[in-house]
């Protein structure tokens, strides 16, 4: 069994915990509880013939004035930065957090998740902005933790990217 530490990063109330809960337990709650520090969850599964355990570090939200506790990133083999499609300012936080995380852990597999695609008519983050990011090499995914849209696919994409870098014997 291969174990991989994955960090969930981003601003307050973008859906990091909801994404983890949807992925690990297939549940969604409308009750918002701010994560303090870090909450760790695990999910074991088989992907492309490899048994993998993702150890998910759901880190407390950041605001424009705060920075990620970089010690939490130690040992991360991949990460997600999450933004709320309905709040443009969360994209700036996600992008600055992504750069800081890459500086700490190196060029590990990572994705920018734009969450709340169930509210796409209310999005402030435009497809044009996302296209520019994608052209610059940022891997962008659109999810809805509430409806479960593309949540499993996001975690599976990261798992495949992490395993592609593995030099392990099966």
Image (tube, rainbow, N blue to C red):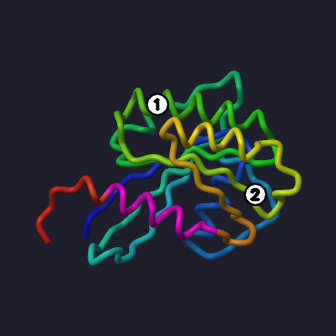
Q: How crowded is the residue under tag 2: few (<14 C-alpha within 10 Å), some, or many (20+)?
A: many
Q: Residue furthest top?
A: 65
The overriding secondary structure of the stretch rendered in magenta is helix
Tell me, yes or no, whether the highlighted magenta stretch contains residue 134. no
Q: Secondary structure at mark 1?
A: helix
- Quadrant of residue 54 in the image? bottom left
Horizontal and vertical percent position of residue 47 = 35, 74
Q: Residue furthest left?
A: 169
Tell me which residue sits at (25%, 70%) in the image.
1
Tell me which residue sits at (59%, 55%) in the image.
141
Is residue 31 rendered to the left or right of residue 8?
right
Residue range in magenta is 150-162
Identify the mark at residue 116; answer none if there is no mark: 2
Q: Secondary structure at mark 2?
A: loop
Identify the mark at residue 70; answer none if there is no mark: 1
Q: Nearer the viewer, residue 136 or 75?
A: 136
Q: Is residue 168 above or below residue 22?
A: above
Is residue 53 rendered to the left or right of residue 128?
left
Q: How crowded is the residue under tag 1: few (<14 C-alpha within 10 Å), some, or many (20+)?
A: few
- Distance from disc 1 to disc 2, alpha carbons, whole Å, reads 26 Å
Is residue 165 rendered to the left or right of residue 167?
right
Q: Nearer the viewer, mark 1 or mark 2?
A: 2
Q: Is residue 9 above or below residue 46?
A: above
């Amino acid at each position: 069994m291969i174990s991989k530490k994955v960090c969930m990063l981003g601003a307050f109330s973008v859906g990091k915990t909801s994404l983890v809960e949807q992925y690990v337990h297939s549940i969604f709650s409308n009750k918002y509880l701010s994560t303090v520090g870090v909450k760790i969850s695990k999910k074991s599964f088989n992907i492309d013939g490899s048994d993998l355990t993702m150890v998910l570090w759901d880190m407390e939200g950041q605001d424009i004035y705060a920075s990620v506790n970089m010690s939490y990133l130690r040992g991360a083999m991949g990460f997600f930065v999450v933004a709320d499609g309905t709040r443009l300012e969360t994209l700036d936080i996600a992008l600055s957090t992504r750069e800081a995380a890459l500086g700490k852990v190196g060029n590990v597999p990572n994705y920018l998740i734009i969450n709340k695609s169930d509210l796409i008519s209310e999005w402030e983050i435009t497809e044009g902005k996302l296209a520019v990011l994608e052209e610059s090499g940022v891997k962008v995914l659109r999810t809805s933790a509430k409806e479960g849209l593309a949540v499993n696919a996001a975690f599976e994409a990261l798992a495949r990217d992490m395993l592609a870098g593995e030099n392990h014997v099966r």
